[in-house]
Image: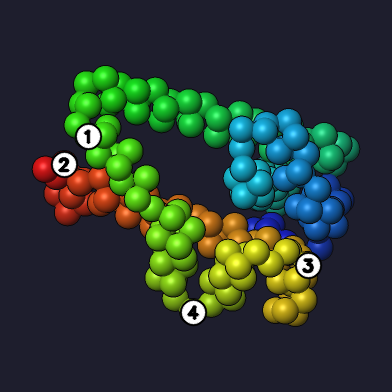
Amino acid sequence: MVGDGLDGESAVLTDVAQRLHDMYARFSEREPYVLQRAFPQLSLASCQETAQEAYLATGRLAAAGELPQDTNLDAYLHRAACNRAKSELRRAARAEQRLLVITNSDAPRAVAAADFFADLDLLDDLVKPAIRSMRASRRRRVVELQSLGWTDDQIAAELAIPLASLQRDRYNALRFLRRTLARHIRAGLGNNPQNGQKGD
């Protein structure tokens, strides 16, 4: 199956897969804002990533022939995106609970965490260096321009790519950046990634 996030190659798309393929740009542009209204705790970037994940998961089902041909794709994709947003909020709540446990049982480390973040300009000190650590590619250029405040339309015009390609590039870049930032933050809080031991 060809294009817009659907896996595999096929000369002929099934009806449901073709409909899914055709609605990619509209869904990717609209759904993050729908999600953000429904889940204001989530950032727009998180909602964009959630919508992409929902679309890709649905695309895999369509490619495998596991979606009925009469599936209401608008409703299915929205429900899939909402379910993933709820899962993201549950993960965040669990992380916050773990932080509370750490705070209550390890006050010095909690103070160190607060000091670490207080001394940072998150964009300049964390995000931009992480972007620079990416190998030169179109996805890196996408997030570089976004970090400068460019809109999706401006980035797409600058790179001469469709919005759907821009959003795919951003999704893949965000996955890389999330892993890089997590390692950086752990290191800043005194965790040693080499042996899994906490630092002094």
Ranked by sequence position, the earlier of labels 2 and 4 is: 4
Tell me the quarter of the picture where residue 24 sits: bottom right
Q: Amino acid at mark 1?
A: Arg
Given this view, does label 3 or label 1 mark the residue nearer the observer? 1
Tell me what residue is drawn at x 81 percent, y 63 percent. Answer: 12
Given this view, does label 2 or label 4 mark the residue nearer the observer? 2
Q: Is residue 120 left or right of residue 18?
A: left
Tell me the quarter of the picture where residue 151 sits: bottom right
Q: Amino acid at mark 4?
A: Ala
Q: Position of residue 102 (x, y in %)?
A: 27, 26
Of 80 and 158, nearer the camera is 158
Q: Residues within 10 Å of mark 2 (few under 14, many from 20)?
A: few
Q: Amino acid at mark 2?
A: Lys
Q: Are marks 2 and 1 in contact (CB under 8 Å)?
A: yes
Q: Decide: is 150 above or below 181.
A: below
Identify the residue under disc 4: 136
Identify the residue under disc 2: 198
Callout 2: SS: loop
Identify the residue under disc 1: 109
Tell me what residue is drawn at x 49 percent, y 58 percent. Answer: 123
Tell me what residue is drawn at x 27 percent, y 50 percent. Answer: 188
Q: Amino acid at mark 3?
A: Asp
Quote the CA–CA distance across marks 2 and 4: 33 Å
Tell me the quarter of the picture where residue 33 sits: top right
